Amino acid sequence: MANTHPKLGPGHFQWYAGGWFGAQFGATLWILLSGLVFVRSEPLLAALLVACSVAANLIGVALWSLRGRFLPYPALQCLVGSMGISAAAALIITDVFGRLSELEPRLADSPSGPYGLLVLYPLMMIIFHLQERAALRAARGNV
């Protein structure tokens, strides 16, 4: 049986179910809902979008189930990275199908607009890195 006691992190981030699953499902729900929008009109696109959402969620659930083996901060970075890759894949796939502007009608004039939002994922990773580093420095007394 796997160790279900979470591994304690040395810095700012710790295992917390509400934050973990809230972020995971919140970041992937739009992909799932986008897939459902295209179920009747474009079933292959719908299936690919649902697969993108499911893949990121499977990674998140796997990391959570192995929280007794992994430190929370690197696992969180892996989760955010997988959510970013899933979001990028969903946008690219929808764009290849020529349906990107249908997700948000206001994007009809600038269908590449959603790609700019992908910068949020590496920005979050950088912010989390800075938070973890600051917490580690404070713990060592090197403030």
Image: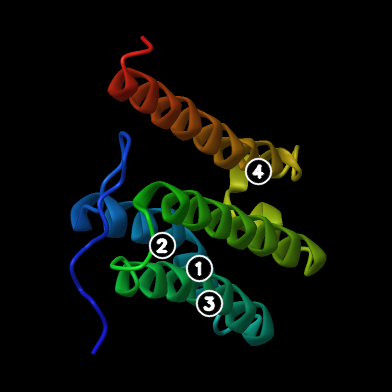
Check disc 2: other Cα within 10 Å, few if <14, some if 14-19, many if 20+.
some
Q: Which amino acid does label 3 sit on?
A: Val
Tell me the tag on residue 29.
2
Q: Which amino acid does label 2 sit on?
A: Leu
From mark 1 to mark 3, how far is it between C-alphas?
10 Å
Circles 3 and 4 in contact, beta carbons < 8 Å: no
- Residue occupying the point 26% across, 46% down: 14
Q: Which amino acid does label 4 sit on?
A: Pro
Element type at mark 1: helix
Front residue of 41 and 34:
34
Residue 80 location in percent, x, y? 50, 51
From mark 1 to mark 2, how far is it between C-alphas?
10 Å
- Residue occupying the point 37% across, 28% down: 136
Check disc 3: other Cα within 10 Å, few if <14, some if 14-19, many if 20+.
many
From mark 2 to mark 3, how far is it between C-alphas?
10 Å
Residue 101 location in percent, x, y? 68, 52
Question: Which mark is first along the chain, 3 or 1?
Answer: 3
Circles 2 and 3 in contact, beta carbons < 8 Å: no
Tell me the tag on residue 114.
4
